[in-house]
Amino acid sequence: MSETERIAQQLERTWAGDAWHGPSLKELTDGLTAKQAAAHHVDEAHSIWELVLHCRGWMREVERRIGGADPAEPEGGDWPSVGAVVDERWAAARADLGVAAAGLARAIRAFDDARLGDRVGQQRDPALGTGSTYYVMLHGAVQHNLYHAGQIALLRKFT
């Protein structure tokens, strides 16, 4: 099995599937209403919905980068606005997170293992995750999802 296949499988497990760490993002967001997902239970902390949009945006940005685009912030920004709190929009946000995970996993599988040691961007910019290797960035995408999955798991306890 190639390294990119291993990374893609790990990424997929952050969204759905047999995750070693605990519940996947899909499991953690199942059964929540829009109102529950948008709630701010902790001062100055993001809502579950905001975390979902954030993860989706960064997965799309990583996919863009491995497709050859110059590094940037996600198209909708680092922390996109939730907008109108209605169940249909929340369902769409969750579905779109799954689409983003599937798209990134596909792109990772198509990425040449020989390029994993190449640098992403010319200089180190921790805010954009540039200057590190594709290997580090792709594992970072997995870690990023899991970090925010932990936050979502804690926020669910307030719902």
Image (spheres, helix red, strand yellow):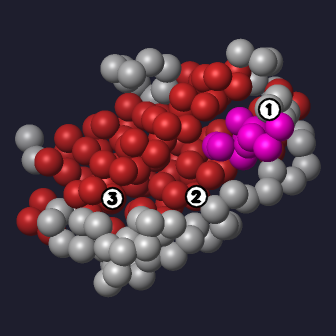
**How far apart are the two marked residues, 3 and 2, measured between alpha carbons?**
15 Å
**Looking at the picture, how far across and down is residue 57, in whole percent?**
58, 58
Q: Residue 42 carries which label?
A: 1
Secondary element under disc 3, as helix, strand or loop, is helix
Q: Give the range drawn in magenta.
A: 43-52
Q: Residues within 10 Å of mark 1 (few under 14, many from 20)?
A: few
Q: Which residue is drawn at 48% across and 55% down?
A: 59
Q: Residues within 10 Å of mark 2 (few under 14, many from 20)?
A: many
Residue nearest the viewer, comparing 75 with 78: 78
Identity of the amino acid at label 1?
Answer: Val
Q: Earlier in the sequence, mark 1 or mark 2?
A: 1
**How far apart are the two marked residues, 1 and 2, measured between alpha carbons?**
23 Å
Q: Is residue 59 magenta?
A: no
Point out the image quarter for the N terminus: top left
Q: Residue at x 26, y 64 (%)?
A: 134
**How far apart are the two marked residues, 3 and 1, measured between alpha carbons?**
30 Å
Residue 90 visible, this angle: no
Say above or below: 92 vs 155: below
Say above or below: 118 vs 56: below
Residue 139 visible, this angle: yes
Q: Residues within 10 Å of mark 3 (few under 14, many from 20)?
A: many
Secondary element under disc 2, as helix, strand or loop, is helix
**Residue linked to disc 2:** 57
Q: Quadrant of residue 12?
A: top left
Q: Is residue 48 magenta?
A: yes
Residue nearest the viewer, comparing 152 with 108: 152
**Residue linked to disc 3:** 137
Secondary element under disc 1, as helix, strand or loop, is loop
Residue 37 horizontal side relative to residue 122, left or right: right
Say above or below: 35 vs 78: above
